[in-house]
Image (cartoon, rainbow, N blue to C red):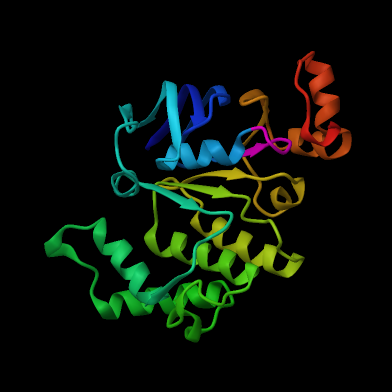
């Protein structure tokens, strides 16, 4: 069992003064699916980017640990080798590198030089995963995300996730812009990963994704920190009552972006 822990995390963007994260605390283990919900502008994506090591964000206080070891000083590639994976809200297009080349390189970068994945084994796994996600073989030979629709990019992120098999996957609004059929396919891929060796932190605005990927724990962020945690029923309550209702119930002095 592996653990991912965020302790009293305070973060701001480089060149900015205002804190975005104001003391986030979170602990999860493999075998668990956690969801983070919250209104716009509360720091959900900043949390995902900071965990993964985006240099555009500065940690002012606190720590991020994998299995009790701090990763604050590690660059992105070392965090990935330690078992982290980030499915981005807006994946970049990289011409000149095919999906298959990128994924195989990512897999082998986490393995010893004398234990690289054989090409036949890689192709067999790739073919199976493509079928799971209703993706064509032709997509694996296209340049990474180049010319992909929004839905194709999201499926491609899940394809990478299933092939790389990280310990912890952070899914940053993987449901945004998806129609119901694409949402079901993406959810199928994440659910196929569930097990004792995998954990996921799902960041979303809406409860609908959680109809297909049932979380063990739901966290609500407001004002740059987690203000309430509960089971899957908490997401249903938010859908019914909204964030303003929970804020008022907790007596928080937080202004929501949508109220401006």
Please tell me whether the stretch drawn in magenta is mainly helix, strand or loop.
loop
Above or below for 156 versus 39: below
- Identified at 85% across, 32% down, the residue is 259
View extreme (left): residue: 114
**Occupied quadrant, residue 30:** top left
Across and down, in percent, residue 60 comes to 44, 22
Across and down, in percent, residue 43 comes to 61, 34
How many discs mark residues in the rendered view?
0
Q: Is residue 30 magenta?
A: no
- Taking the image as shown, residue 13 lies to the left or right of residue 149, namely left
View extreme (front): residue: 15
Across and down, in percent, residue 244 comes to 84, 28
**Occupied quadrant, residue 1:** top left
Residue bounds of the magenta highlight: 35-42
> The C terminus appears in which quarter of the rendering?
top right
- Identified at 67% across, 56% down, the residue is 175
- Taking the image as shown, residue 213 lies to the left or right of residue 258, namely left
| Residue 34 in view in this figure | no
Looking at the picture, tell me which residue is in the foreground, 107 or 142: 142
């Amino acid at each position: 069992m592996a653990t991912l822990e965020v302790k009293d995390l305070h973060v701001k963007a480089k060149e900015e003064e205002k804190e975005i994260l104001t003391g986030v605390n979170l602990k999860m283990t493999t075998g668990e699916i956690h969801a983070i919900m919250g209104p716009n502008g509360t720091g959900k994506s900043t949390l995902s980017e900071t965990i993964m090591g985006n240099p555009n964000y500065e940690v002012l206080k606190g720590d991020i640990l994998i299995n009790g070891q701090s990763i604050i000083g590690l660059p992105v590639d070392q965090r990935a080798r330690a078992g982290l994976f980030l499915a981005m809200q807006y994946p970049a297009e990289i011409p000149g590198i095919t999906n298959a080349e990128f994924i195989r390189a990512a897999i082998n970068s986490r393995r010893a030089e004398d234990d690289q994945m054989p090409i036949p084994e890689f192709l067999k796994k790739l073919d199976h995963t493509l079928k799971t996600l209703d993706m064509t073989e032709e997509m694996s030979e296209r340049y990474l995300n180049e010319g992909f629709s929004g839905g194709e990019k999201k499926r491609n992120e899940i394809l990478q996730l299933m092939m790389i098999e990280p310990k912890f996957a952070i899914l940053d609004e993987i449901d945004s812009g998806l129609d119901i059929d694409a949402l079901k396919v993406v959810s199928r891929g994440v659910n196929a990963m569930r097990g004792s060796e995998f954990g996921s932190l799902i960041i979303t605005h809406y409860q609908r994704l959680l109809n297909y990927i049932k979380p063990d724990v739901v966290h609500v962020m407001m004002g740059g920190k987690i203000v309430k945690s509960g089971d899957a029923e908490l997401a249903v309550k938010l859908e019914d009552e909204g964030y303003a209702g929970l804020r008022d119930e907790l007596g928080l002095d937080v202004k929501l972006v949508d109220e401006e």
